[in-house]
Amino acid sequence: MSTTTSANPTTNPHLRAWVEQVAGRTRPDRIEWCDGSEAERVRLTKLAVEQGILLPLNAEKRPGCYLHRSDPNDVARVEHLTFICSREKEDAGPNNNWLAPAEAYAKLGALFDGCMQGRTMYVIPYVMGPIGSPMSKIGIEITDSVYVVLNMRIMTRMGRAALEMLADSNDFNRGLHSTLDLDPEKRFICHFPEDNTIWSTGSGYGGNVLLGKKCLALRIGSYLGRREGWLAEHMLILGVESPAGETTYVAAAFPSACGKTNFAMMIPPESFPGWKIWTVGDDIAWMRIGADGRLWAINPEAGYFGVAPGTNTKSNRNAMACVERDTLFTNVALTDDGDIWWESIDAPAPEHLVDWRGNDWQRGSKEKAAHPNSRFTAPMANNPVLSPQANSSEGVPISAIIFGGRRSTTVPLVLQSFDWRHGVYLGATMGSETTAAATGQVGVVRRDPMAMLPFCGYDMGDYFAHWLAMGQRIPNPPKVFQVNWFRQDEGGRFIWPGFGENVRVLKWIIDRAAERIPGRETPLGFVPASGQIDLAGLDLSPAQFEAITAIDAPAWQAEFDLQEELFQKLARTMPSELIELRETLRGRLER
Ligand code: GTP
Ligand code: SPV
Ligand code: MN
């Protein structure tokens, strides 16, 4: 068997040796080094269309857009098949599945043996973060999926520029992926933090295979962040510009499918003239302490892998603009005229669609036409409100950090922590109802500390300790808040209108962060004093506002008991400061 290779663009001996070693194992027919050029995009897109991997959409309605249908058994992240393969089991913590590195290398190694025979092996050099930024990290993903190449091209700074930045260094993440035959029995996502290595098999779905995203930027990133003294977080980053022209930057952690993309691009309502939101990032933040003593954040990504259902011109006009062109859609429905459709998009369901599985769908069908976790991959350059700082090497200074879950009860609209330590507590004890972003039951409350439960690459108790230690080191730390857009009434309807109206809460947050206004102290933190949240023009009665802001003591006692379960699970490494703080809060609430 001979392997043909496209012109090898690098003299980096570490990279060359590794690519050779991988090819020796996977035995592809062809090796292709990706350069990130437009010609390459055109050629690979054509190939993907010929192979039925991509379906061209109506070129007038959606220029440069394609639809991909993944295997119906492969539509979300698979947390039960995701492993942290640290040398010591304890280092992975009770929050992660663990496999011994030798065992994982052997098991997946056997799956990789000869798996690319008859296929092309793509070598994708990429940078997470702006090219040349001291905050950025370089990865190489080797994959046999052309879908992965085309997605990585949108989601990262990919190709020649990454190789130039790497030069002859050995400091790069080694990512290896094969779809194999998409057999769920052979599906594993393994991280080797001590080797800066990721091996992924048997899936073709987003978070499992776009290795720069959750695998490198969060699981390996959080491990590196602890070692190197920074934070890798599941957070959007936005700038909020006031009518006076002052821009304040905020980072917010909401669990998967709980509103980060929407919040990062929101359009303030007409009753907020002169206010403007600028998107820096919609999913991941890397934050370090700047020379000025503040916390500075970059978005390591270059595109959005966003949830499609629920996106429309009312909920997120900017996301709709992002997906007008040059976008890859995964598992949405197809209209008869070659456009896309999903539940709650602007247009009502047409008479006939082809659903996400490729089957005919008639209006009135009980089946969803688009998969609840169907997604768009769109370049951030398409975003009409992309922050001018989105490519800045230094990033942006963060004035406030927000933690938010999806809670139909108990958690109020907004709460400010007393201090950093209490802020860490609010993040650490966050609960949220599960969504379709991962396989498994939807709608059950689970603890999802800092929205990082599926993404923290080491022991969660140690992660809380790292957060507490960071607080000691930041001379001028951001203020920390908790929000909840998802309180429901007895009929199961959301009470708070959400989306663009969330700017009303954001304004209070930045005013508090700047210490411009007093707050109202409660046993659990600061809440808005009466009238501090502007409700003008909202269809929300005072009773409804009271319902979503009230702190219900018995419900909170139950909440403390649920938090206890998490603390017990993490008992070995749980910082005592947080345990003491819980007792203080519980005591205050009782009095
Ligand atoms: P990941 O990409 O999985 O990390 O998700 P995300 O946090 O970026 O979530 P996204 O913004 O895509 O929102 C997911 C779902 O939440 C969509 O169905 C939205 O319509 C819904 N949503 C977002 N913001 C709000 C809000 O303020 N109120 C309500 N009720 N729903 C919201
Ligand atoms: C999430 O699930 O939080 C996502 C989508 O952002 S994925 O990249 O699949 O993880
Ligand atoms: Mn996410």
Image (tube, grey):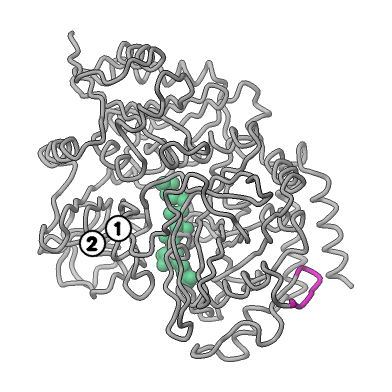
65, 477: nearer the viewer: 477
Q: Residues within 10 Å of mark 1 (few under 14, many from 20)?
A: many
Residue 341: which quarter of the image? bottom left
Query: Which of the numbered marks, if any, corresponds to residue 382?
Result: 1
Residue 561: which quarter of the image? bottom right
| Type of amino acid under label 2 | Glu
Residue 261 in the image: x percent, y percent? Answer: 43, 60
User: Which residue is identified by label 2?
Assistant: 324
Question: What is the CA distance from the residue labelled 1 to the residue labelled 2?
Answer: 8 Å
Provide the residue span drawn in magenta: 518-525
| Type of amino acid under label 1 | Asn
Name above or below for residue 135 compared with residue 143.
below
Identity of the residue drawn at 83% across and 48% down: 577
Q: Residues within 10 Å of mark 2 (few under 14, many from 20)?
A: some
Residue 351 in the image: x percent, y percent? Answer: 15, 72
524, 444: nearer the viewer: 524
